[in-house]
Amino acid sequence: MAAICDRAIHLTRRQVPELAPLEGPGTGEPPFARLQVSLAQVTPTTGSAAAVAVLATASTLLASFIGEGLTTSLLREAWPDDFTGDTPEATNT
């Protein structure tokens, strides 16, 4: 999971270059802890957009490894009140 988080953060930096470069995986801090420090250094608007982008990217990466169904199930378990898991295809039918 740490590798997925690191990759998601790296990819998000392409979209949000204001994020400070994060130290490598050997720093002893988990990726999301390092991200939290980086997010504190940008404006709230930029930080919110970056946090959403990191979570979306991490979800996409996770789905590529374990499948969309299991990923959706895990996200619903983590955020039962906030995650509907509706895909654009599901909302259009």
Image: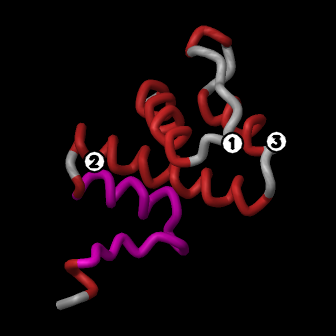
- Mark 2 vs mark 3, CA separation in Å: 30 Å
Tag 3's secondary structure? loop
- The image shows residue 80 at horizontal and vertical percentages of 50, 68
Secondary structure at numbered mark 1: loop
Nearest the eye: 78 or 45: 45
Residue type at mark 3: give it: Gln
Q: Residue at x 52, y 47 (%)?
A: 15
Quick check: 6 above or below 62? above
**Dot 1 amino acid type:** Glu
* Residue corresponding to mark 1: 18
Residue drawn 82% across and 41% down?
Answer: 41
Q: Is residue 32 left or right of residue 42?
A: left
* Magenta extent: 69-88
Q: Amino acid at mark 2?
A: Ala
**Residue to which mark 2 is pinned:** 63
**Furthest residue toward bottom:** 93
Q: Identify the coloring.
A: secondary structure
The crowd level at tag 3 (other Cα within 10 Å; few <14, some 14-19, many 20+) is: few
Which comes sooner in the sequence, label 3 or label 1? 1
Asked if marks 2 and 3 touch (Cβ < 8 Å), the reply is no
Question: In the image shown, does 87 or 76 lie closer to the viewer?
Answer: 87
Q: Inspect the magenta stretch and tell me whether residue 84 lies in it.
A: yes
Q: Is residue 74 left or right of residue 93?
A: right
